[in-house]
Image (cartoon, rainbow, N blue to C red):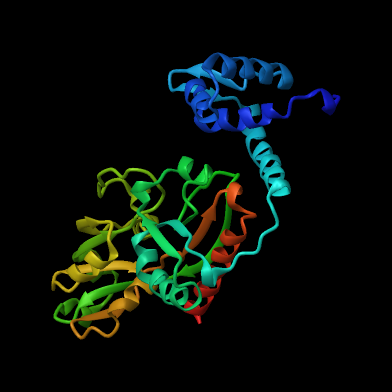
C-alpha cells in the first residue's frame, strides 16, 4: 500500500466514528455535513476492506477489526498531536489552570486533602474541579474533557493510560458499645447488621440488591467464596456517611483501611481486622491519550504520584 496516496484525515474520522458509533454525532463533532461523514465511512470501509460499523439492535456497532484498530489509531493521532505541539515549559507557580478530576469519595477522603495542601505550596492559583463517578463517562475521559480519573476499576478501555497509586487492605469500624467486639469472629460478623459502601466504575449508578454479589464488590465477593453472606441494612456511596453511621451500636462498616484511618482517633469506635480474608483493592489514576504529552498534565500526574507515595509512607 502506497501511504502517499492515503488521506490521513481518514484516521481522524475513524477515531471519532469509533468513539461516537453514530454518523450524525461524529459529523457534528468534526463540523462537517452528515453526507460528508457517510462518504468518509465508505472510504474507510474500502481502505480497510471491512464494514467498520454495522447496524444492530443496539445501534451502530464496531466490528472486531474496528476494535483492533481503535487503540492503534488513537496512538498514531496522539503522536501526531505531540509532534505539532509547541515546546513550552509548564510553570506551576504562575499557572491559573483548572484541572477536572473525577474522584471517588474514597479518593476525596484519602488523597485530595494532602494534594490540596501541596498545591497551595507549589501552585496556589491552580484550581481543581472534582467530579463524582456518576458525573463522568469513559467517553468524556477519552475526549479529554476530564483530565484525570482516580478510582478503582475492574476494566478500562485499552487506549487509556493508567498508573497504580496504591493498594489498600480492608478494616471494620465498630461502635465501642457494641458487645460484638468482645467475641470478634466470623460467626459474630455474619450475625450483625452491615453498612455497604462502595462506588466503582463510572456513569450513572443504579440501585443495589444484597442478592447481586457480582456488583457488591470485594467484601461480599470474598464472603461468597467461603459460602457466607452478610446482612446489609444500608447501602451508601459515601465513606464519610458510612463512618458516621458506623458509630451506631448495631452496625458494622467494612471499608478500605486508609479510609478507616479518618476515625482512628475517635473514642466512640474501634477499628478491627475483618475476621476473614479480603483481597486488597487497587487505586488507579487514568487519563486520555490526548493528554499524555501535555506539560501541565504531566506535572499534575507526577505531583499526584508523589503525594500518593508520601501518604503510604
| Depth order, front residue of 26/97 | 97
Q: Quadrant of the N terminus?
A: top right
Furthest residue toward front: 94
Residue 175 lies, in percent from the top left, at: 18, 77
Judge left or right: residue 84 versus residue 294: right
Residue 291 lies, in percent from the top left, at: 58, 51
Residue at x-position 23% and y-position 62%:
195
Number of marks in picture: 0
Can residue 13 be seen by looking at this rendering? yes
Q: Is residue 81 above or below residue 259?
A: above
Residue at x-position 41% and y-position 62%:
128
Can residue 170 be seen by looking at this rendering? no
Hey, which quadrant is residue 39 in on the image? top right
Q: Is residue 309 above or below residue 62?
A: below
Furthest residue toward right: 2
Q: Is residue 178 above or below residue 295?
A: below
Residue at x-position 23% and y-position 65%:
242
| Depth order, front residue of 170/26 | 26
| Depth order, front residue of 1/280 | 1
Residue 74 lies, in percent from the top left, at: 64, 40
| Depth order, front residue of 12/122 | 122
Judge left or right: residue 226 versus residue 138: left
Residue 68 lies, in percent from the top left, at: 65, 34
Amino acid at each position: 500500500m502506497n501511504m502517499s496516496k492515503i488521506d490521513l484525515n481518514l484516521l481522524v474520522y475513524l477515531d471519532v466514528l469509533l468513539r461516537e458509533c453514530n454518523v450524525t454525532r461524529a459529523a457534528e463533532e468534526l463540523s462537517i455535513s452528515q453526507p460528508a461523514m457517510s462518504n468518509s465511512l465508505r472510504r474507510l470501509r474500502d481502505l480497510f476492506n471491512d464494514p467498520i460499523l454495522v447496524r444492530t439492535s443496539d445501534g451502530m456497532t464496531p466490528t472486531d477489526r474496528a476494535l483492533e484498530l481503535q487503540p492503534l489509531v488513537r496512538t498514531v493521532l496522539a503522536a501526531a498531536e505531540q509532534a505539532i505541539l509547541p515546546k513550552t515549559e509548564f510553570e506551576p507557580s504562575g499557572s491559573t489552570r483548572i484541572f477536572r478530576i473525577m474522584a471517588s469519595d474514597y479518593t476525596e477522603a484519602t488523597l485530595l486533602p494532602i494534594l490540596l495542601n501541596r498545591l497551595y505550596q507549589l501552585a496556589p492559583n491552580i484550581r481543581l474541579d472534582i467530579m463524582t463517578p456518576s458525573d463522568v463517562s469513559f467517553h468524556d475521559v477519552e475526549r479529554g474533557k476530564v483530565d484525570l480519573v482516580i478510582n478503582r476499576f475492574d476494566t478500562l478501555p485499552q487506549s487509556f493510560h493508567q498508573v497504580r497509586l496504591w493498594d489498600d487492605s480492608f478494616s471494620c469500624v465498630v461502635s465501642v458499645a457494641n458487645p460484638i467486639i468482645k467475641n470478634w469472629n466470623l460467626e459474630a460478623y455474619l450475625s450483625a447488621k452491615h453498612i455497604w459502601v462502595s462506588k466503582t466504575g463510572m456513569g450513572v449508578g443504579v440501585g443495589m440488591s444484597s442478592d447481586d454479589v457480582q456488583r457488591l464488590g470485594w467484601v461480599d465477593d470474598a464472603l461468597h467464596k467461603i459460602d457466607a453472606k452478610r446482612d446489609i441494612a444500608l447501602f451508601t456511596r459515601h465513606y464519610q456517611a458510612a463512618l458516621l453511621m458506623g458509630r451506631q451500636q448495631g452496625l458494622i462498616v467494612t471499608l478500605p483501611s486508609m479510609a478507616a484511618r479518618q476515625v482512628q482517633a475517635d473514642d466512640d469506635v474501634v477499628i478491627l481486622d475483618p475476621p476473614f480474608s479480603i483481597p486488597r483493592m487497587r487505586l488507579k489514576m487514568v487519563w486520555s491519550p490526548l493528554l499524555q504529552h501535555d506539560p501541565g498534565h504531566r506535572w499534575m500526574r507526577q505531583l499526584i504520584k508523589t503525594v500518593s507515595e508520601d501518604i503510604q509512607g
